[in-house]
């Protein structure tokens, strides 16, 4: 019983000593063994290791890639347009001995503070350098700027035993106090561009309208000219036909014209006309007191002359109808467009050819005989 009393405490002490002399290194860690504050061993491979109990101290550090996010950083690019950026950095402990000497007992927390200060300074230096504007920061050149920041941060963080894996700019915004002013300026620029675009569009529309109006006026003037020419030619042909008919038998032509005038003037059952007693209108219907109405000389060609005159009148009427149809088509075109064309000078405006003279009283005696 007494022996067991002594053996049990000794056994417990031995077990405790063995357990305190063994430490395990995880695959996600790297370890420093310190003896009286001095670095005795470094372990970066996973496994079981021994140390002196009570004399050796095991300090563990992360062997994985760590991340650090920076607070918002206000920078002023070369164009004096202030921006607010935030970034993050990926880093890992490259040299445990150098890292321990640099941060001492501060450990990872002290390393993050120092690395954050380095990152803040290099971001301000790169984004505020000459030639770097706010447009550059927001353009695809942003990648080159991040690579420059990474190189500078890595060069200064190597003194801490740290390897910088990557540096990224996450957000680039305007400061709150400048946001409204910048927004209004952007709106004004877009409105100015919209006004310029509308002005250019209106100018192009005016050119198109002017060209269309010029083409319309030219076509309408040509149509008016052709219409007036056709009307003039029709009038000239009508006058020529009348002149030829008059030249064949002037006396019969005068007689035929008088009969046509009677037909048009004396219409209906009762016609009243106020004329001078000496009027020549009824020369072919009154008795001159000498021989009443003269016997009409038998003219063998009277029927032929009448047929010729009627044929001439029909040809003239047909030509006049063609000219009127052309004029009506032109007027319909003008009415559809709603504009009044410019009148062109044409042969129709010239003085018409002289028509056959009206029948005179002296001609009556030559074509009529005496009557009762």
Image (cartoon, rainbow, N blue to C red):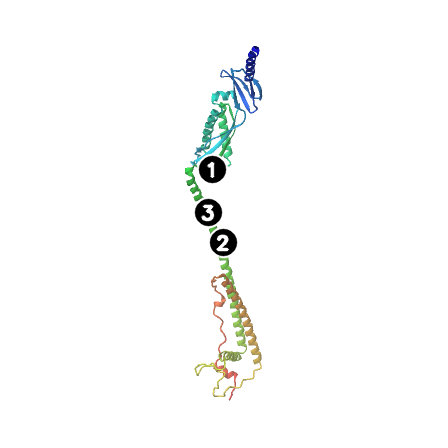
In the image, farthest residue toward the bottom: 372
The number of numbered badges drawn on the structure is 3
Q: Label 1 belongs to which residue?
A: 135
Report crowding for label 2: few under 14, some 14 to 19, many 20 or more residues within 10 A (C-alpha).
few
Residue in the picture at 46% in, 49% down: 198
Question: Residue 197 placed where, x, y %?
Answer: 47, 48
Query: Which badge, 1 or 3, is on the more N-terminal residue?
Result: 1
User: Along the line of sight, which residue is nearer the eye, 262 or 45?
Assistant: 45
- Label 1 or label 2, whichever lies nearer to me, is 1
User: Along the line of sight, which residue is nearer the eye, 61 or 358?
Assistant: 61
Distance (Cα) linking label 1 and label 3: 22 Å
Q: Quadrant of residue 44?
A: top right
- Label 2 or label 3, whichever lies nearer to me, is 3
Report crowding for label 3: few under 14, some 14 to 19, many 20 or more residues within 10 A (C-alpha).
few
Assign the N terminus to one quadrant of the image.
top right
Report whether residue 231 is seen.
yes
Residue in the picture at 54% in, 21% down: 31
Residue 208 shows which numbered tag?
2
Q: Label 3 belongs to which residue?
A: 194
Distance (Cα) linking label 2 and label 3: 21 Å
Question: Residue 323 placed where, x, y %?
Answer: 53, 68
Report crowding for label 1: few under 14, some 14 to 19, many 20 or more residues within 10 A (C-alpha).
few
C-beta proximity under 8 Å, tags 1 and 2: no
Q: Measured along the vertical axis of the image, is residue 237 above or below residue 7?
A: below
Residue 186 shows which numbered tag?
none
Q: Measured along the vertical axis of the image, is residue 105 above or below residue 274?
A: above
Question: Residue 81 placed where, x, y %?
Answer: 43, 36
Residue in the picture at 42% in, 37% down: 176
Query: Which badge, 2 or 3, is on the more N-terminal residue?
Result: 3
């Amino acid at each position: 019983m007494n022996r067991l009393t002594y053996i049990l405490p000794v056994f417990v002490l031995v077990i405790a000593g063995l357990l305190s002399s063994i430490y395990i290194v995880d695959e996600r860690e790297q370890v420093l063994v310190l003896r009286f504050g001095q670095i005795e061993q470094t372990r970066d491979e996973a496994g079981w290791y021994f140390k002196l109990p009570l004399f050796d101290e095991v300090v563990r550090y992360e062997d994985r890639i760590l991340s650090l996010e920076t607070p918002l950083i206000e920078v002023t690019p070369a164009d004096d347009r202030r921006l607010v950026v935030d970034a993050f950095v990926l880093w890992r402990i490259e040299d445990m001995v150098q890292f321990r000497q640099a941060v001492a007992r501060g450990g990872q927390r002290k390393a993050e503070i120092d690395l954050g200060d380095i990152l803040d300074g290099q971001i301000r230096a790169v984004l505020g350098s000459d030639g770097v504007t706010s447009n550059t920061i927001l353009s695809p050149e942003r990648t080159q700027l991040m690579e420059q920041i990474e190189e500078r941060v890595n060069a200064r963080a190597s003194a801490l035993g740290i390897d910088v894996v990557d540096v990224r700019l996450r957000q680039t915004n305007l400061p709150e106090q400048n946001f409204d002013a910048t927004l209004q300026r952007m709106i004004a620029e877009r409105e100015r561009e919209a006004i310029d675009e509308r002005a250019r569009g209106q100018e192009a529309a005016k050119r198109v309208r002017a060209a269309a109006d010029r083409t319309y006026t030219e076509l309408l003037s040509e149509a008016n000219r052709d219409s007036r020419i056709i009307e003039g030619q029709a009038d000239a042909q009508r006058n020529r036909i009348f002149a030829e008919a008059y030249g064949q038998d002037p006396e019969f032509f005068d007689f035929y014209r008088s009969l046509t005038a009677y037909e048009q003037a004396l219409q209906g059952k009762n016609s009243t006309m106020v004329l001078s007693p000496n009027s020549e209108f009824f020369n072919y219907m009154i008795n001159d007191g000498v021989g009443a109405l003269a016997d009409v000389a038998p003219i063998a060609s009277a029927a032929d002359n009448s047929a010729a005159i009627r044929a001439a009148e029909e040809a003239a009427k047909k030509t006049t109808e063609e000219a009127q149809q052309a004029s009506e088509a032109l007027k319909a075109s003008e009415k559809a467009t709603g504009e009044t064309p410019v009148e062109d000078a044409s042969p129709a405006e010239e003085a018409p050819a002289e028509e056959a003279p009206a029948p005179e009283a002296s001609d009556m005696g030559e074509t009529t005989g005496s009557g009762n």
